[in-house]
Image (cartoon, rainbow, N blue to C red):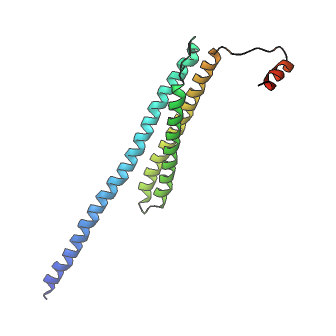
Amino acid sequence: MPAVQQSVEDLEVIYDKVQADSRFSLYYLREVDAAIEAAAGVRNDAQTAERAIKQFLAQLAETGGGEKPIDPADRLATISAAAEAAVKKTIRVLQGYEGAWKGASISTEHAEEVSEGNREAIIALQNLHDSMVDLRWAVTEHDADLEVPEGEAFDNVEDLVADLSSR
């Protein structure tokens, strides 16, 4: 086979490899970008929610919450517990991704970008979680302070113990 023919066959192999590498590179870069964008979205959503909660907490602190219960049906306590659990789960997932990205065979630069995005999202979620707990407790305490105690008031410990023993 003439040398030129052999060279063309060698070039075909090279061109096939270049196309495959290009497709992989584009896929890889899209995946890295998607991971960074997803982490940024989580971070932004958490920061937005935290700002809203902090505004409510500031308003509650400024006004004292008023003379009526804020959450008489305990809806906030119920939805807050579920939301807090969801945030904790998301934090654990992102922490797992952190280890996965460090062990992945991607460039150090891309691994650092993804890791930084994950860390920022984790911090934002942790701050959100803390704010949700603060809000739940503030509302619960406010409402509890407004409740009128039920039952008998005792003037001494002996009467209280006697009443508890009779139950």
Instruction: Say above or below: 5 vs 16.
Output: below
Where residue 78 appears, as percent x and y from the top left, is 53, 30
Asked if residue 15 lies left or right of residue 121, the reply is: left
Asked if residue 1 lies left or right of residue 134, the reply is: left
Instruction: Say above or below: 78 vs 38.
Output: above
Where residue 36 appears, as percent x and y from the top left, is 40, 47
Q: Nearer the viewer, residue 163 or 33?
A: 163
| x 57%, y 34%: residue | 130
Q: Indicate the quadrant where residue 70 lies.
A: top right
Where residue 42 appears, as percent x and y from the top left, is 43, 40
Q: Nearer the viewer, residue 134 or 155?
A: 155
Q: Nearer the viewer, residue 139 or 134?
A: 139
- Residue lying farthest bottom? 1
| x 47%, y 53%: residue | 97
Asked if residue 160 lies left or right of residue 105, the reply is: right
Total numbered labels placed on residues in the image: 0
| x 39%, y 50%: residue | 35
- Residue lying farthest right? 158
- Residue lying farthest front? 166
Q: Nearer the viewer, residue 10 or 147?
A: 147
Instruction: Say above or below: 31 vs 136.
Output: below
Instruction: Say above or below: 25 vs 62.
Output: below
Quadrant assignment for the N terminus: bottom left
| x 76%, y 14%: residue | 153
Quadrant assignment for the C terminus: top right
Q: Indicate the quadrant where residue 159 lies.
A: top right
